[in-house]
Amino acid sequence: RTLGASPWFLVLRVAIPAALPQVFVGLFMGLGAAFSTLVVAEMLGVKAGLGWYLTWAQGWAAYPNMYAALIVMALLFSGVITLLFVLRDRVLSWQKGVVKW
């Protein structure tokens, strides 16, 4: 501000880039919690979704189907996490090589 920067410049070029690393940490933590909550909710209260299918397959002793559902869940979660990592690397390109993830 002392050097004549406008309030919009300070927000767009200083405040938001300074906050982005913590935003991505929150996204990673929230994504893990949201995914596990989704699976548990599907297992307990819904008659659709991979969580329900997992419980159904276990009840009928269809273990190959159960493991296939687990693999699909793991692949979906890994894909979403990978997309978030790619987005983080593009948005925080100025941090590359400085921070070890």
Image (cartoon, helix red, strand yellow):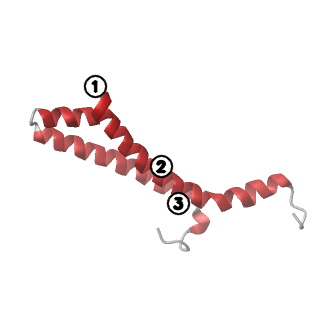
Q: Rate crowding at label 1 as few (under 14), some (14 to 19) or many (20 or more) other CA atoms within 10 Å.
A: few
Q: Give how far apart the Cα atoms at labels 2 and 3 are.
A: 18 Å
If you read the primary sequence from the N terminus, does the residue marked by circle 2 or circle 3 appear first?
2
* Residue type (three-letter) at the residue carrying disc 3: Asp
Q: Residue furthest left?
A: 61
Q: Residue furthest bottom?
A: 98
46 left or right of 94?
Answer: left
Q: Rate crowding at label 3 as few (under 14), some (14 to 19) or many (20 or more) other CA atoms within 10 Å.
A: few
Q: Which residue is mark 3?
A: 89
| Residue 2 vertical placement versus 74 (above, below) | below
Counting from the top left corner in percent of width and height, residue 22 is at 58, 59
Q: Residue furthest top?
A: 47
* Residue type (three-letter) at the residue carrying disc 1: Lys
| Residue 91 vertical placement versus 66 (above, below) | below
Q: Give how far apart the Cα atoms at labels 2 and 1 are.
A: 25 Å
Counting from the top left corner in percent of width and height, residue 17 is at 67, 59
Residue 49 visible to the viewer: no
Q: Which residue is mark 2?
A: 30
If you read the primary sequence from the N terminus, does the residue marked by circle 2 or circle 1 appear first?
2
Q: Secondary structure at mark 1?
A: loop
Q: Secondary structure at mark 3?
A: helix
Counting from the top left corner in percent of width and height, residue 52 is at 26, 32
Quadrant location of the N terminus? bottom right
> Which residue does the image show at 90% across and 63% down from the upper left?
4
Counting from the top left corner in percent of width and height, residue 63 is at 11, 41
Q: Which residue is mark 1?
A: 47
> Which residue does the image show at 58% across and 63% down from the upper left?
93
Q: Secondary structure at mark 2?
A: helix
> Which residue does the image show at 61% across and 57% down from the upper left?
20
Residue 12 visible to the viewer: yes
Q: How many marks?
A: 3
Q: Give how far apart the Cα atoms at labels 1 and 3 are.
A: 38 Å
